[in-house]
Image (cartoon, rainbow, N blue to C red):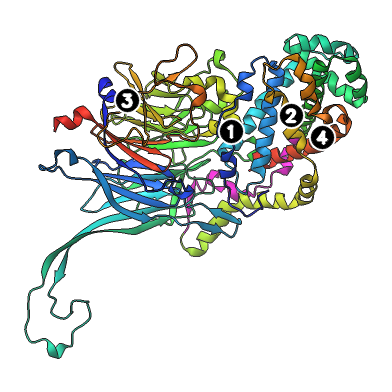
Amino acid sequence: MGEDTDTRKINHSFLRDHNYVTEADIISTVEFNHTGELLATGDKGGRVVIFQREPESKNEPYSQGEYNVYSTFQSHEPEFDYLKSLEIEEKINKIKWLPQQNAAHSLLSTNDKTIKLWKITERDKRPEGYNLKDEEGKLKDLSTVTSLQVPVLKPMDLMVEVTPRRIFANGHTYHVNSISVNSDCETYMSADDLRINLWHLAITDRSFNIVDIKPANMEDLTEVITASEFHPHHCNLFVYSSSKGSLRLCDMRASALCDKHSKLYEEPEDPSNRSFFSEIISSVSDVKFSHSGRYMLTRDYLTVKVWDLNMETKPVETYQVHDYLRSKLCSLYENDCIFDKFECAWNGSDSVIMTGAYNNFFRMFDRNTKRDVTLEASRESSKPRAILKPRRVCVGGKRRKDDISVDSLDFTKKILHTAWHPTENIIAIAATNNLYIFQDKVNSEMH
Amino acid sequence: MLGRGLKRKLSDYEENMAGLSSAFDSSRNLTYPLKRQLVLNMCLTKLQTYKMLVEPDLHRSVLIANTVRQIQEEMRQETSQQPVNVCNGLGLHSQNYTGVDSAGISAQLLSGVNQQESNCCDSRSAEEPIENGLLMVSDDDMSSAISSILKDLDFMEDISPPTCLVPAGDDQPKSPENVGLKLEDDRQELKGAECVFGSFEISNSTSYLKDLAIDDIFEDIDTSMYDSDFCCPPLMPSRVPPATTEETLKTFPTCNSSSTNNIQICRTDLSELDHIMEILVGS
C-alpha cells in the first residue's frame, strides 16, 4: 500500500465553477456511505451534495468509478433563536449515512443545533393509463369512461427525490460537533461541547442524555467534548474525546448516564515538548474507530495517534503530521489556526491512515511499513488522471527542488475534512470549496 | 464592534491570518517571562474579542482560559518561591535584564509594580540605557497588568459561587430521578424544555445586562495599549541592531511620557478583561 499511495491518480476532480470562494461554498464535511457508491458533502451554506459512482462502462474503461453529482438539496436554513437573540448558522457540521435497509438511502445531517434525517429515493418509471385520472392526474368525467384498461409503468428520466423524514430539534444547548449511528441501526447519538444525547431514529421528541460534563458552576469548566463515536460492532460502547487530549470509552450497560467512563485513554505529557500551548495542541479534534473495532484513531493539532482499546496508558502508534509547525505555535495561536479541527480517516483494511494539513497538503501513513507521504490537492496538479507527486516540506537545511519551505506554506488553504472509501482505495478530500476525489492507480488497473 | 444579536462570524478575524510573520517564533532571544507575558496578553485580547460575540466558541474559550490559568499558576509559583526584595528597586534592573534568569525577572516584575505605585517611573528613563528603559517600561505595564489580573482572578475565585446564576432546573439531568432523561411529550413541554436548555444562555444574558453600564465605559476606554505597548516587543525583529532601538522607542511615546496614566487605564482595562474572563468562563 505504501507505494500505492505515491502513485495515486486522479480519477475525477469536481470543481465548483467559482473562481472566488464564497463563504457558503466552503465544504464542511465529507462522508462515504457504507458501500462507497455514494459520497455526500455538506457546506457552510447548509447544502448537501450527493455524488454517485458511475457504473463500469465497457466502452470507456476510464469512466469506471467516476463520481458525478447525484442530488443536491438544502438541508439547513439559517434560523434565528428569538429567545436568545441568536442566529443559528446553516453550516452542516456532520453527515452520517444510515445502513441501507431498502431501495432508499438515508442520511443524517446536522448543523450546530438541529439534526435532520433525509431519505433519498430514485424514480425512473411512472404509471400511465389510469382509468379515472387523466395525464395530469385530474379526475376524468366518468361519463367519458367507456372502456377499462390496465395501467402500465412507463420509463422516464431518472428523478432523485430527497425528502425530510425526521427533524430532531431542541436537544442541544451547545454546538453539535459529531453524530454517530449505532450498530443496532435503530439509535444514534449526537454530541455537543458538554453533553451527548442518545436518540431513536424514529422518535424526534425525546432523547436520552448519556453524558453530561457540565459543571454545576460554569467557572469550573476546564474541559469540553470534541468528538464522539459509537463502536462499529458493540452497540453498547462509544468513545468521546476531550479538549484535554483524553479519550473516554463508555459502556451503556453500566448505567444510563455514562458520566463515569469505563476506560480512560490518556498519554502523559512529554516534558521536553512543554509549552504554553501544550494543552491547546493536545486537544483531540477527531476520533474514529477502526473498521475492526480494535483500534481508535485520534487527531490532535500536530499528530495522529492509534490507540489499542486494550491499552489505556499510551497510544500504540504516533505519527507526526507537521512537526515543523512546533516552532510556529505562537504565530498559529495568534492567527487562530491552532484551533483548526483536522479530521482523520482509516482505509478499508485499517492499514493506512489519512489526515489533512495546511497548504492543501494531506498526509498518509502506512502502519505496516511506517512509510508516510505528503500529497497535495490543488487545481494545478489535478488534471484528470494525473498522478499525484509526493510533496516535501523543507525544514531548514538543504532544500531540494520542488520542496516548499515552512515559511511559504499557505495557512488559509487547509484540508480539514477527508474520507476514505469503505473498501477501495478511493479518497475524497475537501479543500476549501473544492472536492477532490483520488483513486489508487493500481486499484483501477486491476479492474 | 459587533452588536449583540449578530451572528458570530470569524471571517473578519480570519482575514488577518494570511502570512505567518511569526514575529514571536523567530525572535527566540526573548526572555521566557517576556514571552509568557506576550502569550498572556494574546489570550486576553482573544477573550476580549470573543466577549463581543453573542455565542463565543466554548471550546476555544475553555482552551484559552486554561492557558491563562496555567500561566497564572506558573507565575504564582514563581513568586512564592522567590521572596520579593522590594528594597532592591532600581538597582536591580540592568542586572536582571542582562541575565535571562527567570526568578530574577519575576523579582523585577514585582519591583516594577511597587515602583509604579511609588511613582518613580520618571527617574529611571534618564539614568538607564535606552534599551533597558524600553524593555522595562513595557515590562512595568505588563507586570502591573498581570498583578491586577492575578488579584482580580483571586477575587473572582473567592466570589465565584454567588455569581453563578445558573438556575437549578438546568442541572436536572444530573438528579437521580431523571437519570438524564429529557422527555418532552408535546409542543408546550418542548417549549418548556427549550427554556431549560436555554437557561444557561438566559442567565448569561442577564449578566450581560447587569454589566451593561460597565461595558459602555469600557468601550470608551482607549484600548490602544494592547495594540501598541503590549504587542510591540514581539513585533520587533530580533536582529534589530542597538542603534535602531532609539528609533523604535520613538514610535511608542506613551511608554516613556505618560506611563502613569496608562497604568491607570490599563488597570481599569484589566479589571474589565477580568470581567470578560468571568463571563466567558461562565458561559
Q: Position of residue A108 (x, y in %)?
A: 36, 49
Q: Which residue is mark 4?
A: B267
Quarter of the image with the N terminus of chain A in it: top left
Can residue B282 be seen from the camera position used here? Answer: no
Crowding at label 3, few (<14), some or many (≥20) Cα neighbours within 10 Å?
A: some
User: Who's the residue at 36% across and 53% down the image?
Assistant: A117
Q: Earlier in the sequence, mark 3 or mark 1?
A: 1
Q: Which residue is mark 3?
A: A389
Q: What type is the residue that disc 1 sits on?
A: Asn
Q: Which of the chains bears the disc numbered 3?
A: A
Is there one chain holding both mark 1 and mark 2?
no
Crowding at label 2, few (<14), some or many (≥20) Cα neighbours within 10 Å?
A: some
Question: Horizontal placement of A428 versus B118: left or right?
Answer: left
> Residue A388 falls in which quadrant of the image?
top left
Q: Position of residue A424 (x, y in %)?
A: 23, 33
Alpha carbon separation for disc pair 1 and 2: 17 Å
Query: Bounds of the magenta span?
Result: B156-184
- Residue A13 painted magenta: no
Alpha carbon separation for disc pair 4 and 3: 56 Å
Q: What type is the residue that disc 4 sits on?
A: Arg
